[in-house]
Amino acid sequence: MNHSFSVLLDAYRRLWPNRSLADGPLDEQESQTLLYETIRQELRDEWTHPRVRQSPEVKFYYAVKRVAASDLPDGMKVALIQAYLTVMEQLQANHT
């Protein structure tokens, strides 16, 4: 049930195909960094105009809902949600 970050990044790309993410071969560290940074930007709603941005908690809810409803294997869903939890906890720790 342990998935590599490159596999998780590919799963993220499948769920959000319109997101521009670096293409080409990435090692595990680069894949982890890119995945976490992309999730952080998503949770902070950085791609939305500032007047209509939603809170990280709302964005987290929608992201988890989308992952859970996807056709990814259950183990992949859990690993991707865990990545979201990790980033969300970092955002909460930095916010306080």
Image (spheres, rainbow, N blue to C red):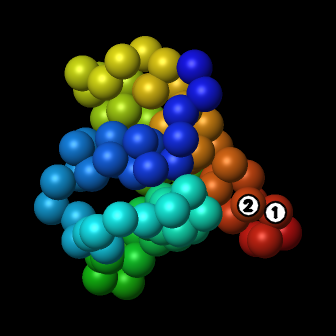
Residue 63 spot, x, y in % from top left: 40, 43
- Where is residue 26, by image quadrant? bottom left
Question: Relative to 74, does residue 92 appear above or below in the rendering?
Answer: below
- Where is residue 68, by image quadrant? top left
Residue 59 spot, x, y in % from top left: 44, 53
Q: Amino acid at mark 2?
A: Gln
Depth check: give the residue in front, 86 or 13: 13
Question: Relative to 65, does residue 93 appear above or below in the rendering?
Answer: below
CA neighbours of label 2 inside 10 A, class few (<14), some (14 to 19), many (20+):
few
Label 1 with label 2: CB-CB less than 8 Å: yes
Residue 12 spot, x, y in % from top left: 34, 47
Q: Element at badge 2?
A: helix
Q: Element at badge 1?
A: helix
Can you see residue 60?
A: no
Farthest bottom residue in view:
50
The CA distance from mark 1 to mark 2 is 5 Å
Depth check: give the residue in front, 60 or 81: 81
Query: How many numbered marks are there?
Result: 2
Question: Relative to 12, does residue 34 appear above or below in the rendering?
Answer: below
Q: With 80 as the anchor, is 22 left or right in this view?
A: left
Tell me what residue is drawn at x 33 percent, y 41 percent.
Answer: 11
Tell me what residue is drawn at x 61 percent, y 37 percent.
Answer: 82
**Quadrant position of the N terminus in the picture:** top right
Q: Which residue is mark 1?
A: 93
**Quadrant position of the C terminus in the picture:** bottom right
Q: Which residue is mark 2?
A: 90
Q: With 81 as the anchor, is 19 left or right in this view?
A: left
Farthest top residue in view:
74
Can you see residue 75?
A: yes
Question: Relative to 76, does residue 51 appear above or below in the rendering?
Answer: below
